[in-house]
């Protein structure tokens, strides 16, 4: 069965720290998504990757296709970054036919 | 623009009752999806509609039906609710193209007692 594994499950950081969340998957994919779920429950798309690296502000996402691994980095973390970060992969087929990781719960302390 | 709107936000049902979760998007997207999120598990796809007039099953379709009423609206119906359907339900829509990002609704928290 195709799986998506995220690590760590939980992460506590001090404001200003550099944060890395990892995602591994089992077979070749067509696209990988990073999502953010706020404490209130809403989900926002952060990145879609098929190769290489993308950057939005303090967020950086990378993917290594050969190693079947992606990382989400947050530089200069802030308490407002506290959320659950979810990795999801598309193994082919329709856009939203995704396998989701269980999420990484990040808490950034002031 | 409102994006993706789900109603209701919260609902409590008794076992055996029926209800319809509504989802509407105002971004002219072709594809719409319903997912459920359970504690300790990743989101799972219930049903999707790649275009107006088509629907397909996802990973966990049992106990649900869907209707793509028009391009804007995609509803999820529970005909006879069961406690196992207690979950948070998310609707999402996607612009055309594989390498695009999704837009999610705020979720519906459903409890079946």
Image: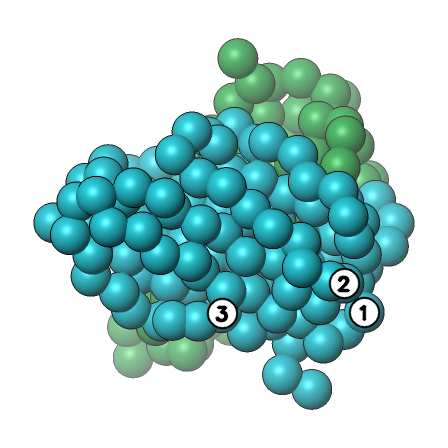
Chain colours: A green, B cyan
Q: Is residue B34 left or right of residue A57?
A: left
Q: Residue at x 75, y 37 (%)?
A: A94
Which chain letter goes with mark 3? B
Q: Chain of mark 1?
A: B
Q: Quadrant of the C terminus of chain A?
A: bottom left
> Which labelled disc corresponds to residue B6?
3
Q: Which comes sooner in the sequence, label 2 or label 3?
A: 3
Q: Which badge, 1 or 2, comes first in the chain's sequence?
A: 1
Most extreme residue toward the bottom, as rendered?
B1
Q: Residue at x 82, y 40 (%)?
A: A51
* Mark 3 / mark 1, whichever is N-terminal: 3
In whole angstroms, how far apart are the C-alphas of marks 1 and 2?
A: 7 Å
Element type where label 1 sits in the image:
loop
Q: Can you give x and y, in whole percent of width and height, for residue A92 in the image? A: 76, 28
Residue under circle 1?
B28
The residue under the point 11% across, 49% down is B113
């Amino acid at each position: 069965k195709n799986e998506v594994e995220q690590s760590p499950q939980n992460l506590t950081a001090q404001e200003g720290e550099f944060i890395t969340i990892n995602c591994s998957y089992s077979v070749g994919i067509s696209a990988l998504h990073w999502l953010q779920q706020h404490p209130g429950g809403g989900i926002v798309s952060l990145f879609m990757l098929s190769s290489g690296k993308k950057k939005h502000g303090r967020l950086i996402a990378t993917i290594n296709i050969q190693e079947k691994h992606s990382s989400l980095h947050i530089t200069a973390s802030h308490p407002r970054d506290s959320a659950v970060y979810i990795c999801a992969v598309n193994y082919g087929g329709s856009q939203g036919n995704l396998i989701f990781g269980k999420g990484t719960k990040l808490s950034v302390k002031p | 623009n409102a994006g993706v709107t789900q109603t209701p936000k919260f609902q409590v049902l008794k076992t055996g009752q029926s209800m319809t979760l509504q989802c509407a998007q105002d971004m002219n997207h072709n594809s719409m999806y319903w997912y459920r999120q359970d504690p300790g598990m990743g989101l799972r796809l219930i049903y999707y509609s790649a275009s107006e007039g088509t629907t397909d099953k996802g990973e966990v379709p049992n106990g649900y039906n869907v209707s793509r009423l028009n391009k804007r609206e995609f509803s999820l119906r529970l005909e006879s609710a069961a406690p196992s359907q207690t979950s948070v339900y998310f609707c999402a829509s996607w612009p055309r193209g594989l390498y695009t990002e999704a837009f999610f609704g705020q979720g519906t928290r459903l409890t079946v007692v």
